[in-house]
Amino acid sequence: DPDVAISIDDVAMVQTWREHSSEMHLSGLYANVQEALRAVIIRPPVRLFAKAEDPDIFEFNVTITAFALGQMYNEPLPLHLGLEGTSPETGFFALDYAEVAKKYPSDALTLPFVIRRVNRAPELFIDRSHFSVTQLQAGVLLEGITVSDPDARMDDEIEVVLSVEGEGGAVEFAGSQGTHFTKQMTLQRLNFELQNLR
């Protein structure tokens, strides 16, 4: 996935190309490369699960391929692997990199990653600090209350529980009246009905 970023924790003893991109290359002495790969950092896309419409699961694979650069023709570093020709302006490799690399002894390891959405709690908002009523009024309209859920679409069902504490009070909501009841409805209808809460 082009939006996944790869980096390593310590690059002091190895040479790297295109760090923080979806395809990172590094080279160095065997011991130094081993040490560098002890802490590989994988960063998923920044806007992952930003919208309720996004899939609940994001899957991708990370493949690590190692090439024995000094074990062919006694060359300490291949002359045309593509690394020396990397453009410092773009950071891209030579087009024939993959084909040339196939000539060197190598092994690969693929690691599957699965990131699941966390079901975040809904949030309640109200546009006033308090409600007031006189003894001459039979009730008060509790308008201005809305519910938001970052993981729910407007047509997803939401469960709401309303209860009254104390004596002598009751609430009227979505055709029901009482001191405690539970309702299930879509998020869109819930916010509509809340504007008629009494």
Image: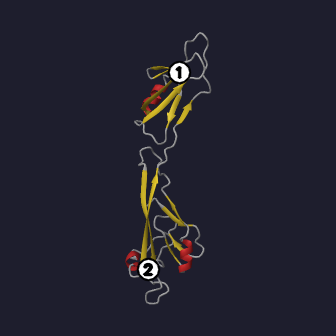
Q: Residue 158 is drawn in which quadrant?
A: top left
Whether the residues at callouts 1 and 2 have beta carbons within 8 Å, the answer is no
Check disc 1 and report its element: helix, strand or loop: loop
For residue 179, which numbered disc appears in the image?
1
Which one is closest to the eye, mark 1 or mark 2?
A: 1
Q: CA distance from mark 1 to mark 2?
A: 75 Å
Q: Amino acid at mark 1?
A: Thr
Q: Amino acid at mark 2?
A: Leu
Residue beneath label 2, please?
81
Residue 131: x and y, percent?
60, 22
**Closer to the camera in the image, 47 or 167:** 167
Residue 72: x and y, percent?
43, 87
Residue 44: x and y, percent?
49, 57
**Closer to the camera in the image, 185 or 91:** 185
Q: Eyeballing the image, is 15 above or below 150? A: below
The quarter in which the N terminus is drawn is: bottom left
Determine the residue located farthest toward the left in the rendered image. Answer: 99
Mark yes or no: residue 103 visible: yes
Determine the residue located farthest toward the bottom in the rendered image. Answer: 74
For residue 166, which numbered disc appears in the image?
none
